[in-house]
Amino acid sequence: MPRSKAEEWLAVALAEQALPGWDLTREFPFDKARKWKFDFAFPSQKLAAEINGAGRHQSFKGMTADYEKWNEAVRQGWRVLLFRANAINPTSAQRAAAFILEVLCCPPSTALDSGE
Protein backbone atom coordinates (compact mmCIF):
# COMPACT_ATOMS: atom_id res chain seq x y z
CA MET A 1 0.00 0.00 0.00
CA PRO A 2 1.46 3.39 -0.96
CA ARG A 3 2.30 5.76 1.84
CA SER A 4 0.35 8.97 2.19
CA LYS A 5 1.82 12.46 1.97
CA ALA A 6 1.07 12.86 5.68
CA GLU A 7 3.16 9.78 6.49
CA GLU A 8 6.01 11.05 4.35
CA TRP A 9 5.91 14.51 5.95
CA LEU A 10 5.96 12.97 9.43
CA ALA A 11 8.84 10.66 8.44
CA VAL A 12 10.88 13.68 7.30
CA ALA A 13 10.07 15.60 10.49
CA LEU A 14 11.01 12.64 12.69
CA ALA A 15 14.30 12.22 10.81
CA GLU A 16 15.09 15.91 11.31
CA GLN A 17 14.47 15.66 15.06
CA ALA A 18 16.01 12.22 15.58
CA LEU A 19 18.02 11.44 18.67
CA PRO A 20 20.92 8.98 18.70
CA GLY A 21 19.71 5.57 19.75
CA TRP A 22 16.18 5.91 18.40
CA ASP A 23 14.91 2.71 16.91
CA LEU A 24 12.25 4.30 14.72
CA THR A 25 10.74 1.66 12.44
CA ARG A 26 8.17 2.27 9.73
CA GLU A 27 5.48 -0.30 9.05
CA PHE A 28 6.45 -2.15 12.24
CA PRO A 29 4.65 -5.53 12.54
CA PHE A 30 3.55 -5.58 16.17
CA ASP A 31 1.17 -8.55 15.90
CA LYS A 32 2.32 -11.24 13.52
CA ALA A 33 -0.78 -13.41 14.02
CA ARG A 34 -3.11 -10.64 12.81
CA LYS A 35 -0.47 -9.11 10.51
CA TRP A 36 -1.08 -5.72 12.09
CA LYS A 37 1.51 -3.00 11.58
CA PHE A 38 2.05 0.46 13.00
CA ASP A 39 2.83 3.34 10.63
CA PHE A 40 5.69 4.37 12.94
CA ALA A 41 7.04 2.58 16.00
CA PHE A 42 9.82 2.82 18.54
CA PRO A 43 9.85 -0.86 19.56
CA SER A 44 12.29 -0.48 22.46
CA GLN A 45 9.88 2.00 24.08
CA LYS A 46 6.69 0.35 22.83
CA LEU A 47 5.54 3.70 21.45
CA ALA A 48 3.68 3.84 18.14
CA ALA A 49 2.19 6.55 15.96
CA GLU A 50 -0.64 5.96 13.53
CA ILE A 51 -1.84 8.32 10.80
CA ASN A 52 -5.43 7.78 9.81
CA GLY A 53 -6.71 9.13 6.55
CA ALA A 54 -9.88 9.01 4.58
CA GLY A 55 -11.28 5.85 3.12
CA ARG A 56 -11.42 2.69 5.17
CA HIS A 57 -10.63 4.49 8.44
CA GLN A 58 -13.90 6.43 8.19
CA SER A 59 -16.24 3.53 7.50
CA PHE A 60 -17.92 1.69 10.35
CA LYS A 61 -16.08 -1.52 9.45
CA GLY A 62 -12.73 0.27 9.15
CA MET A 63 -13.13 2.14 12.42
CA THR A 64 -14.14 -1.06 14.19
CA ALA A 65 -11.02 -2.79 12.86
CA ASP A 66 -8.85 0.16 13.93
CA TYR A 67 -10.28 0.10 17.46
CA GLU A 68 -9.65 -3.62 17.69
CA LYS A 69 -6.06 -3.11 16.54
CA TRP A 70 -5.39 -0.24 18.98
CA ASN A 71 -6.99 -2.04 21.91
CA GLU A 72 -4.88 -5.12 21.23
CA ALA A 73 -1.79 -2.92 21.04
CA VAL A 74 -2.59 -1.46 24.47
CA ARG A 75 -3.20 -4.98 25.82
CA GLN A 76 0.31 -5.84 24.62
CA GLY A 77 1.76 -2.83 26.45
CA TRP A 78 2.01 -0.33 23.61
CA ARG A 79 1.26 3.38 23.79
CA VAL A 80 -0.35 4.50 20.55
CA LEU A 81 -0.50 8.11 19.37
CA LEU A 82 -3.13 8.91 16.74
CA PHE A 83 -2.95 11.62 14.10
CA ARG A 84 -5.41 12.57 11.35
CA ALA A 85 -3.87 12.61 7.88
CA ASN A 86 -5.78 15.71 6.81
CA ALA A 87 -4.31 17.60 9.78
CA ILE A 88 -0.71 16.81 8.83
CA ASN A 89 1.23 19.09 6.50
CA PRO A 90 4.95 19.95 6.48
CA THR A 91 4.52 22.48 9.33
CA SER A 92 2.18 20.45 11.53
CA ALA A 93 4.35 17.37 10.94
CA GLN A 94 7.14 19.22 12.79
CA ARG A 95 4.79 19.78 15.74
CA ALA A 96 3.65 16.15 15.64
CA ALA A 97 7.28 14.97 15.64
CA ALA A 98 8.05 17.25 18.59
CA PHE A 99 5.07 15.80 20.47
CA ILE A 100 6.22 12.25 19.71
CA LEU A 101 9.70 13.21 20.96
CA GLU A 102 8.20 14.59 24.17
CA VAL A 103 6.26 11.39 24.79
CA LEU A 104 9.26 9.26 23.84
CA CYS A 105 11.57 11.13 26.21
CA CYS A 106 9.09 11.23 29.08
CA PRO A 107 7.71 7.72 29.57
CA PRO A 108 4.73 7.38 31.87
CA SER A 109 5.42 7.06 35.55
CA THR A 110 4.93 3.66 37.11
CA ALA A 111 4.49 5.17 40.56
CA LEU A 112 0.98 5.71 41.80
CA ASP A 113 0.25 9.31 42.66
CA SER A 114 -2.25 9.51 45.47
CA GLY A 115 -2.84 13.19 44.77
CA GLU A 116 -2.39 14.06 48.41
Image (cartoon, helix red, strand yellow):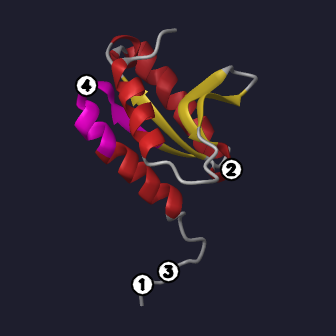
The earlier-in-sequence mark between 2 and 1 is 2
Q: Is residue 76 magenta?
A: no
| Residue lying at 42% horizontally and 22% vertically, measured from the top left | 63
Mark toward the start of the polypeptide (4 vs 2): 2
User: Mark 2 — residue?
Assistant: 44
Across and down, in percent, residue 42 comes to: 60, 44
Q: Is residue 81 above or below residue 39?
A: below
In terms of sequence position, does the residue under pointer 3 or pointer 4 come before the other?
A: 4
Q: Secondary structure at mark 2?
A: helix
Position of 65 relative to 113 (above/below): above
Three-letter code, disc 2: Ser
Query: Is 95 in front, or is 87?
Result: 95
Q: Are marks 3 and 4 in contact (CB under 8 Å)?
A: no
Q: Which residue is mark 1?
A: 115
Q: Quadrant of residue 86?
A: top left
Residue identified by numbered label 3: 113
Q: From the viewer's perspective, is 77 left or right of 64? A: right
Residue neighbourhood size for the residue with mark 3, other residues' Cα within 10 Å, grouped as few (<14), some (14–19), many (≥20): few
Circle 4 sits on which residue? 86
Q: Which residues are magenta?
A: 81-94
